[in-house]
Image (cartoon, grey):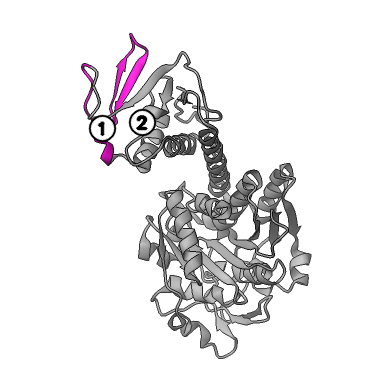
Amino acid sequence: MELIKYLETTRSEKTLLKGIYKDQKLPQNLIKKVNAITEYLDENTAYVYLGEKKDVDWDSIYELAKSLAENAARDYQIDVASFVPGCMCIKGTLDAFVKGINFTNANLYNKKTFTKKVNKNQLSLLIEKPSQEVQDAFNKALILIDAQNFARNLGVTAPNDLNSEQLADIVAKDFKQYTNLKVTVLKKKDIQKLNMGLLLSVNRGSVYEPRVVIIEYNGDPTTTEKTVMIGKGITFDSGGYSLKPSKFMLGMKYDMSGSAIVAATMKAIAQLKPKKNISAIMCITDNRINGDASLPDSVWTSMSGKTVEINNTDAEGRLVMADGLYYGATKLNATRLIDVATLTGAMVMALGDTYTGVWATSDQAWEEISRAAKTQHELIWRMPFDEEYELNIKNSVVADMKNTDLSGMAGSCSAAMFLKEFTNDVEYIHLDIAGTNDIDEKPMFAMVKTLIELGIQK
């Protein structure tokens, strides 16, 4: 099935698929089962029974759209207006259909040698005489889901096809199409000159060079306000000398997802063109073992000058992002820092795969990202910054900090406090997507849409 690419405004030859609610006049022989389709092919029309209007919301339409994309028995032209429930306008209904269909139909990395099951029937969306506001909502939905699918495709790619050098090259080449983005790729020598000792320490075990990709969008030259996003880009995480058990090494190709998410956000920002200044930093390497890989008990010096004792080489994401945060604060002069990372197993234990954990140093920052998440129907939960959580990471005998609190308690909070140490006191939002990024081996990539919304909201 092809992706939705444009909004149809006139009736086509496809069977017209209409939504119908319980309180409407129901056609004879209609199947009164929620989301069941009854076809009246003599009229070239079909109806989806939706039940009570009060029970239908954005999520209901989104899930219906995903189901149709997978299971539609024939070509349908969807009459969007007929699906609008009581709690939503036509723009929201259209948004749910576009995102649901295109999420499901995304052409993602796949090396199966046999033909995978594909629904060859086609869906299209019909709104007769759409207003400019509706057309704008459609265009925005397309941009957001395209960005999410861009990140999903990078994330699901096998690590032997996406090392640090390749990831940087893909983004740099793809972003050449956006003349309003400045892309800078820092190679190992550049990173060494910046004294990014924590990122370099993680890279020591790799056969590939590290990369730092900086993507800048300057949409408002009249202000010094600037948001800088930092994404964790561990293209594969073995755990280093603190080696992961084999079972827990599976899926570690997704450890670069934070970097893919901030890149995808910038891809959408370039198209939506908000009057804001927004940048992203992708901190990219893998975490492997060789004869010179970082050892537990090693002490490394960060770009900030703070020293870190490594008591767990599997807590490497916070190391690469620490240097990225400091770069964003001091070299890009951020007034707000946001980082995104598949950071801690403790996050999965705390919130499962339902909510993304969010830490914010100000109520305003929390309120703004909360509003953006609600607009984009993504679930987030505010977590606490508290000095109590950094007591154990500040008790090193030989360095300013340890990289891990080994107490086994509140590991996601101590990780957040570790990162906060490198923000140079800039307003800061931390997103731990360990539970919501990939579920059952499938790329979900929560927070792409929320970060885009945060970037464009007024």
Callout 2: helix, strand or loop?
helix
Q: Is residue 223 magenta?
A: no
| Residue 142 can be seen, yes or no | yes
Quarter of the image holding residue 46?
A: top left
Label 1 crowd bin: few (<14), some (14–19), many (20+), radius 10 Å: some
Task: Tell me the amino acid under the disc marked 2.
Answer: Phe
Q: Does the magenta stretch include residue 45?
A: yes
Q: Where is residue 39 in the image (x, y as percent from the top left)?
A: 31, 17
From the viewer's perspective, is 213 left or right of 443? Answer: right
Q: Earlier in the sequence, mark 2 or mark 1?
A: 1
Quarter of the image holding residue 179?
A: top right
On-image quarter of the C terminus = bottom right
Point out the residue furthest to the top here.
42
Residue at the disc numbered 2: 83
Residue 452's place in the image compared with 385, above or below, is above
From the viewer's perspective, is 187 left or right of 295? Answer: right
From the viewer's perspective, is 310 left or right of 210? Answer: left
Q: Position of residue 48 (x, y in %)?
A: 31, 26
Q: Residue at x 47, y 16 (%)?
A: 11
The circle drawn on residue 395 is none
Task: Tell me the amino acid under the disc marked 1.
Answer: Val
Q: Give the range drawn in magenta.
A: 28-54
Nearer the observer, disc 2 or disc 1?
2
Residue 351's place in the image compared with 108, above or below, is below
Foreground residue among 449 and 445: 449
The circle drawn on residue 34 is 1
Q: Which residue is drawn at 50% across and 18% down?
A: 10
Q: Position of residue 144 (x, y in %)?
A: 54, 43
Residue 158's place in the image compared with 34, above or below, is below
From the viewer's perspective, is 191 left or right of 130? Answer: right
